[in-house]
Image (spheres, rainbow, N blue to C red):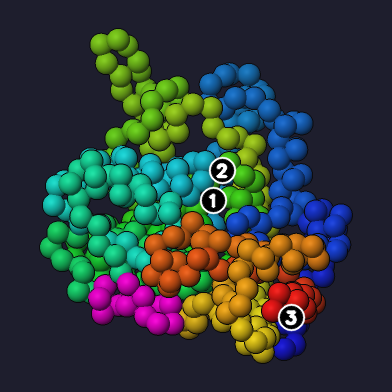
Amino acid sequence: MPLSPAFDVAALREQFPLLCAQPALVYLDNAATTHKPRAVLDAERRFYETSNANVHRSVHRLAHAATDAFENARSTIARFLNAHDAREIVFTRGTTEAINLVAQSWGRSQLHAGDEIILTMLEHHANIVPWQMLAAERGLTLRVVELQPDGSLDLAQFRQLMGSRTRLLAVTALSNAIGTRPPLREMIDTAHRHGARVLVDAAQAMAHDIIDVQDLDADFLVFSGHKVFGPTGIGALWARGDLLAGMPPWQGGGEMIERVSFSGTTYQAPPYRFEAGTPPMAQAVGLAAALDWLGALDRPALAAYEDMLRATLEHGLAALPGVRVVGTAPGKGPLVSAAFEQAHPFDVAQFLDARDIAVRVGTHCAQPLMETLQLPGTLRISLCAYNTVTEVEALLSALADTLEWLQ
């Protein structure tokens, strides 16, 4: 398949110092974490070199510079998501903390015994366990949308699960295990017709899909910086302003307070109400730089390029004996999971690593899904903007050699 002329991957790769320093590396574990372009590294370093001070607290000019950089980062994220207002963005440590924030604040204040939460079989543990914990505490019922044979969601069953007690749908935008993209807008519209709120886990989708929260019409959306070319230890929750305004704090400490006395405490307005303690300032600046960097790319051309890489990979895997692609739903993201008839995926991954090819192996924090598929795990190959056809071909060649040796 020809390279998209609108997307210059060679020039893009030059912006990633790690890839330049390790030219032999074939890195295909992007669903776990992506590498960082020089723009992100420079932004973090520049913050420490020129603006390092605590935010929102001091009157000196360095603190003002740090606060401006931090709040400008919040505004950048809001623009990237097309949020109504930067105050709808809450900084968190990542997707996991953001989901826990919603569960412990909105969930504990709004959900009651007998209420129902709908999840899907595609979910990452981070979008399962917090709801299980809340359900056990509050007497809630969890319902699960099952899969069709191709890995797509059973939408007929989903519609049957929706009922008068449904209060929340929590759904991934892109499966980190098999690449399925659920029909979010259709599911969100259905949930809203039943009076339910919707949380979208966009951790995997952020690097690949254009996300417009106004068009999507969800109620909560969460993501992590390190999966979208940004720093680790930073992520964000977007939520509708009216929902945030009615949510109580979930962590206490400095910054999130308005006034403290031993007779009682009052809290700041959102988003600061949910940002107790010193925030990840440099990481927020780095995350904003990552989104600016990504937003400057030709996103439709990038999407077409990643889809071409995935199709090339799946075509090559189909030609290898004893290899099965797990999850073949239409419209998949640039992620492929493979199972093997006569080899354990862990053994295959070790052989690939010996040839400088990095992939993921295991259940991918999606054990319920793997149990449903009756698999001990899969070999996951996750692609992104800086991967190449040459790398896909190198993987396929190494897989052929590995499977021949193991068999």
Q: Alpha-carbon neighbours of circle 3 within 10 Å: few (<14), some, or many (≥20)?
A: few
> Which image quadrant for residue 172?
bottom left
- Residue stretch in magenta: 146-158
In the visual, does 284 lie left or right of 165? right
Instruction: Identify the residue position indicated by label 2 in the image.
Output: 234
Kindly check if marks 1 and 2 are in contact, taking CB atoms under 8 A apart as contact.
Answer: yes
Q: Amino acid at mark 2?
A: Ile
The CA distance from mark 1 to mark 2 is 6 Å
Number of the front mark, 3 or 1: 3
Q: Amino acid at mark 3?
A: Glu
As drawn, which residue projects farthest toward the top?
A: 262
For image coordinates 61% across by 68% down, the residue present is: 345
The CA distance from mark 3 to mark 1 is 39 Å
Q: Alpha-carbon neighbours of circle 2 within 10 Å: few (<14), some, or many (≥20)?
A: many
For image coordinates 72% across by 32% down, the residue present is: 48
Instruction: Identify the residue position indicated by label 1 in the image.
Output: 224
Viewer-nearest residue: 101 or 39: 101
Q: Earlier in the sequence, mark 3 or mark 1?
A: 1
Considering the image in quadrants, where does the C terminus appear?
bottom right
Q: Element at badge 1?
A: strand
The CA distance from mark 3 to mark 2 is 43 Å
